[in-house]
Amino acid sequence: GGITGKPAFEADMVFVGSEDGRLHAVTADHGKLVWMYYAEGPIRSSPAISDGHVFIGADDSRVHVVNMITGRKAWRENASGPIWSSPTVHEERVYFGCESGDFYCYDFRGEQKWRKKIKRAVTSSPVIADGMVYFGSKDWTLYALEIENGWQVWRFRTGGPIISSPAFAEGKIFIGCGDNNIYAIQAKHARESWRFTTEHQVTGSPIAHEDSIYCGSVDGSLYCVDFRSGRLRWRFNTG
């Protein structure tokens, strides 16, 4: 099946899901299949690895937790819609959104700790920093919730749907948006530091490295933007 998510690496193995509903574990050195796990729908989410287990969402509206060595199911739990968001694992809890517009937190026993209803789909994969979880939604909003109880601390309204996954660095959240912008938002106060406008939607996810932000756009360009000012440093056009 087609592969739309990114692979994960752990213990000399590579883990990746595919659109035929299978989670594959292959050896990193020769690509030999170690095991396959079957979900009941396409897998577009990317796996997360923690505590000897693989965490991944699927179109069967379930989050699946699989033993990394054996490929056997540890547990799985239902969500309210397909899961394209990639799970984030932090301190024995797993966080993810789903296409119905719900955002979940489960513990490692498969017990739901909290659930937050969002207006539209959460395709964006969350990032966790300083006791907060941050993610975007197709309702044009970037959310900040407390990781312990899911309470909403703030939300920031953009000019379009958010599919991009956020990056966190030095107290700021960086995220792309369907309104053609890359945003830099202060994580504590939800104040906009800057925005950089590209020529098309920004559905990909930015990365922060040293004093620069790197992010691609549907306009066919990779942008390098100054971390603090949002000024363009360079642009690479893919053709």
Image: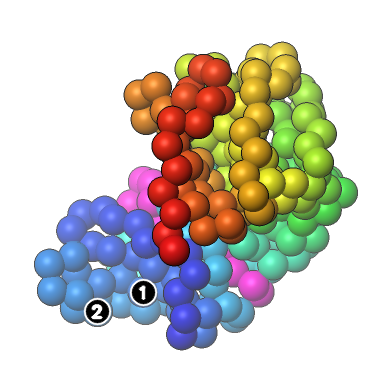
**Residue shown at the point (33%, 61%) measured from the top left:** 68
Colour logic = rainbow
Which of these two is toward me, 120 or 24? 120
The answer to which of marks 1 and 2 sits earlier in the sequence is 1
Can you say whether 81 is above or below 50 in the image? below
Q: Position of residue 77 (x, y in %)?
A: 64, 61
Could you tell whether 62 is left or right of 108 in the image?
A: right
Residues packed near mark 2 inside 10 Å, few (<14), some (14 to 19) or many (20 plus) = few
Quarter of the figure with residue 72: bottom left
In the image, residue 144 above or below residue 215? above
Find out whether the residues at labels 1 and 2 contact each other: C-beta distance under 8 Å. yes
> Tag on residue 202?
none
Q: Nearer the viewer, residue 195 or 205?
A: 195
Q: Is residue 155 visible?
A: yes
Q: Position of residue 73 (x, y in %)?
A: 46, 68
52 in the magenta segment: yes
Residue at image mark 2: 33
Position of 2 relative to 73 (above/below): below
The span picked out in magenta is 49-60
Residue at position x 46%, y 85% from top? 1
Residue 40 falls left or right of residue 4: right
Numbered tag placed on residue 24 in the rendering = 1
Tell me if residue 216 is in the magenta stretch: no
